[in-house]
Image: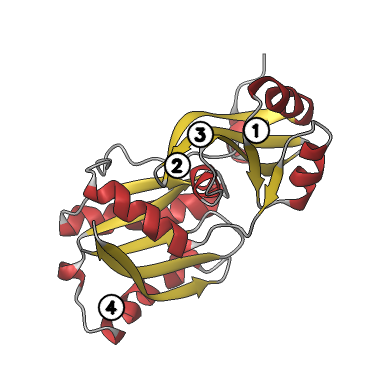
Amino acid sequence: MLLVSIDTSGKSGGITLAEGDRNGFRVLESSSIAGGTFSAQLVPTLASLLQRHGFTAREIGGFAAVSGPGSFTGLRVGLSAIKGLAEVLKLPIATVSLLEALATSSYQQGTIATALDAGRSEVYFGLFSFSNGRARKIAEELLSQTEFASRLTETKPVRLVTSDHAVAELSLVTGAQVQEVTRPGSEVIARIGLQKLLANETVSVEALDANYIRRSDAEILSKPQR
């Protein structure tokens, strides 16, 4: 299966063209996209990747997309592009949470906690059951730093995985075993996405939605005051 993964959740993004089946996986090529240019560069970058490797859009077998948490604008742009392409090409979509991708990076069997700095003294927290190379979600929630420390103490995960040094330092005070890793990119998303596509763990174009860290400031400001 030829698949495309897209990550526009951060300050910069990426697109990966990959192929694989139940017996193997390989990345054909990845391209980065600078922050602020997602809407202008995403589709042209994908078209260039396909052309360089002698493929057409009609040969794509499915898409994998980061659903969050992350930048409100970035996620909206990336998922809107996926929706348009998937609708036209009639292709399945697999969504991957960054917290799930972090758990997959642990390579440790058991209950894995993951976390990302959400700013404003908050942490986006995930809890996963990891076995046989797959991370199954138990919970994902936005917590204050105090709540985050309490959740780690309560759940006693085998390991806490994060790509944010500030979160790693905060976790150490709870006595948790902390694994600091590089932020998962579109290549990791492609690998997880392939597993989901092959298992038919997909979402429809209508159901595809982002998992924002928080509501946009515009939404907050537009909410009627009581």
Q: Marks 2 and 3: CB-CB under 8 Å?
A: no
Q: Marks 2 and 4: CB-CB under 8 Å?
A: no
Q: Amino acid at mark 4?
A: Leu
Sequence-wise first label, 2 or 3: 3
Give residue 52's position: percent from left, percent from top.
Answer: 30, 86
Give residue 32's position: percent from left, percent from top.
Answer: 50, 73
Q: Residue furthest top?
A: 226
Measuring 34% from the left and 79% from the top, which residue is drawn there? 49
Q: Marks 1 and 2: CB-CB under 8 Å?
A: no
Q: Mark 4 falls on what kind of element?
A: helix
| Mark number, residue 50 | 4
Sequence-wise first label, 1 or 3: 3
Instruction: Work out whether 35 lies above or below 70.
Output: below
Quarter placement of the N terminus: bottom left
Sequence-wise first label, 3 or 4: 4
* Marker count (numbered): 4
Question: Which residue is label 2 attached to?
Answer: 210
Give residue 29's position: percent from left, percent from top.
Answer: 39, 77
Instruction: Work out whether 197 lies above or below 48.
Output: above
Q: Amino acid at mark 1?
A: Leu
Question: Which residue is label 1 attached to?
Answer: 221
Give residue 171's position: percent from left, percent from top.
Answer: 77, 37
Question: Which residue is label 3 attached to?
Answer: 128
Instruction: Work out whether 7 lies above or below 206.
Output: below
At label 2, counting other C-alpha atoms closer than 10 Å, the crowd grade (few under 14, some 14-19, many 20 or more) is many
Labels 1, 3: front one: 3
